[in-house]
Structure formats: C-alpha cells, structure tokens
Image (cartoon, rainbow, N blue to C red):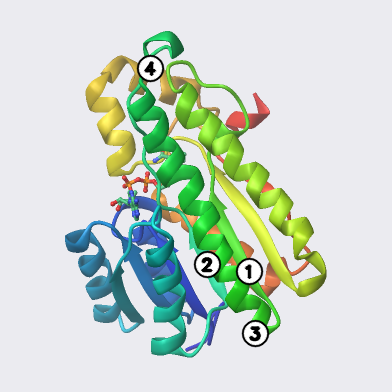
C-alpha cells in the first residue's frame, strides 16, 4: 500500500477513542501496520475492526500505559506481529478533575502523573530500546496547548502536559545521533469524548473555548492525527525536539 508511512509499523496508545482512533485509521490508510493500544477493550477492538474493515492492518492490545510491563508488551506485540517498530504515537491521556489549585486532590494529581507523564515515559523507554536495535524510528507524544501555557482550573493537567514536552525535547537530544526523532503535538480543543465530558460539565466553558479560537471552531481528531503521522514520516526527517501546536492558531493569540 502506498502512503507516507508505507511498510512501517506503528503503535498508538489511547487508540480506542478520539485522536488515537483517528491516528490508527490514518497510519493504516498511509500504509503502516498498527498496534492499537488502550485500557478500554471495547473501544480498542472497535478501532482495530474499523481499520481492518477499511483494508488496513491492525491488532488490538489491552495496555495500561502507566504499567511498565504493559508498555514493554506493547513493543513486543509490534515486533512479534509485524516484525519491528518504526513509529510510536504516545497519545493516551486523561483530563482528570477541574478545580482551582487549593481545592485539587492528591488523587487527581497522581492520576495525571501516572497516565499523562509516567505513561509517556514508560512507553518511550521501551520504544527507544527497540528503535536502537533497528537503527532508528520516530516518536510523537500528545501534549496540549495546556503544555505550553497555564490553564485555569486545570493546573495538574497543565503541569503534566508541560512535563510531556520536557520529556520529548530531552529524549530528542539524547537520541538525535541515533536516527530516533522525538516530537510532540499540542492540540487545541478537539471534538473528542474527552472534550465533550468537559463541555457537559460546564457548557459555558465550552462556549468560551470556541469563542477564544481564532478559527471559531473546534478541531477534528483527524487534524491532530494528520500532524502526528506526518511527524512520524520521512517528510519530517529534519524535525526533532519540536512541540507543534495544532490548535487553529490559538497559540498565536
Ligand atoms: N480533546 C482535546 O481537546 C485535547 C486537547 C489537548 C490534548 N488532548 C490530549 O489528546 C490525547 C487524546 O485525547 P482524546 O481527546 O482523544 O481523549 P479520549 O478520552 O477520547 O481518548 C483517550 C483514550 O486514552 C485511553 N486511556 C486512558 N488512560 C489510559 C491508560 N492508562 N492506558 C491506556 N490508555 C488509556 C482512554 O481509554 C481513551 O480511549 C490525550 O493525551 C489528551 O490529553 C486532547
């Protein structure tokens, strides 16, 4: 199959929903074999089914990114089923609860820490070990505009996403001479189940978010996925250590 990642093997975490599902579909459409990883079995299996129904190659693996054994098993699944690992989109994430800092809980902090930071670290660790044996690869982590600026009532999420960008840039420097590129995408508000949960909790916040967007609309999951697949492709061969806002211009405001 022709495409910008033809013949590559990709893993996508959080592949059972939203941005991750769109990425699985686009990786496969662009010629990659895909391991769909998610803690949600129903959503993950559905994504793998959607990909194969459309003529692509995909398998589902139940994976909790905050568990080292699962992160390692994900890489193994790519190697055993498809012969290696070329591209990784570490996208699984949780939004947690919204509140001002003094009202926030340690539980919410730890949830953000485990999934949004530890999960990205563990996945990268095993992916990079495999990519070193293969002589290269490309990794994209999902941060957020909230990883570039502060966000009212979402301090713990914002802190976690800032950390994702720190891990991304540092890993890019660590492996720059090993042909492993590491980048991040920073989505603005994207029409996914995660954002819809935030909108349901506070419709006024939702309206304000759209009004603040230069393009006056939400992004679609495929608009983030397209950027991630591009960054994993050879077309982005000189791009590493970059945190790319994909946000309808919000970071330019
Ligand atoms: N939607 C937005 O507006 C937006 C904006 C900025 C950043 N993001 C980021 O984009 C990424 C994808 O979010 P989305 O909007 O598609 O959300 P989503 O809730 O639709 O999808 C997230 C997926 O991650 C999975 N997941 C959660 N915890 C996991 C774990 N421990 N192990 C494996 N999988 C796990 C969920 O089951 C779900 O399928 C997240 O990292 C999120 O923080 C989203």
Q: Residue at x 51, y 21 (%)?
A: 151
Foreground disc of the pair 4, 2: 4
For the C terminus, the image quarter is: top right
Marks 1/4: CA–CA distance: 36 Å
Marks 2/3: CA–CA distance: 14 Å
Residue 46: horizontal and vertical position, in percent?
A: 20, 67
Residue 28: horizontal and vertical position, in percent?
A: 42, 76
Provide the secondary structure element on which disc 4 rests.
loop
Among the two numbered marks 3 and 4 on one chain, the one whose residue lies closer to the N terminus: 4
Q: Which mark is residue 31?
A: none
Q: Which mark is residue 138?
A: 1
Q: Quadrant of residue 95?
A: top left
Q: Residue at x 24, y 22 (%)?
A: 201
Q: How many marks?
A: 4
Provide the secondary structure element on which disc 1 rests.
strand
What crowding class fits label 2: few (fewer than 14 Cα within 10 Å), some (14-19), or many (20 or more)?
A: many
Q: Is mark 3 within 8 Å of ligand 1?
A: no
Q: Which mark is residue 104?
A: 4
Among the two numbered marks 4 and 2 on one chain, the one whose residue lies closer to the N terminus: 2
Dots 1, 4 in contact, CB < 8 A:
no
Q: Is mark 2 within 8 Å of ligand 1?
A: no
Q: Residue at x 30, y 71 (%)?
A: 61
Dots 4, 2 in contact, CB < 8 A:
no
Among the two numbered marks 1 and 4 on one chain, the one whose residue lies closer to the N terminus: 4
Q: Which residue is mark 3?
A: 134
């Amino acid at each position: 199959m022709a495409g910008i990642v033809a013949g590559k093997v990709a893993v996508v975490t959080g592949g059972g929903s939203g941005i991750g599902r769109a990425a699985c579909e686009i990786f496969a459409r662009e010629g990659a074999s895909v391991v769909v990883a998610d803690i949600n079995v129903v959503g993950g299996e559905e994504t793998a089914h959607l990909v194969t129904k459309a003529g692509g190659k995909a398998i589902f693996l139940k994976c909790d990114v905050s568990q080292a054994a699962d992160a390692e098993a994900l890489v193994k699944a790519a190697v055993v089923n498809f012969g290696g690992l070329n591209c990784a989109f570490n996208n699984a994430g949780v939004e947690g609860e919204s509140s001002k800092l003094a009202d926030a809980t340690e539980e919410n902090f730890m949830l953000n820490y485990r999934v949004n930071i530890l999960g990205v670290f563990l996945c990268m660790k095993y992916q990079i070990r495999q990519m070193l044996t293969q002589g290269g690869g490309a990794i994209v982590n999902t941060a957020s505009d909230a990883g570039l600026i502060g966000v009212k009532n979402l301090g713990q999420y914002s802190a976690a996403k800032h950390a994702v960008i720190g891990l991304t840039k540092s890993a890019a420097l660590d492996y720059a001479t090993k042909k492993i590129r590491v980048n991040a995408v920073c989505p603005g508000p994207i029409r996914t189940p995660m954002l819809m949960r935030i909108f349901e909790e506070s419709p006024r916040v939702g309206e304000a978010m759209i009004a603040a967007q230069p393009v006056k609309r939400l992004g679609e999951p495929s608009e983030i996925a397209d950027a991630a697949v591009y960054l994993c492709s050879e077309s982005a061969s000189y791009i590493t250590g970059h945190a790319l806002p994909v946000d309808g211009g919000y970071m330019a405001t």
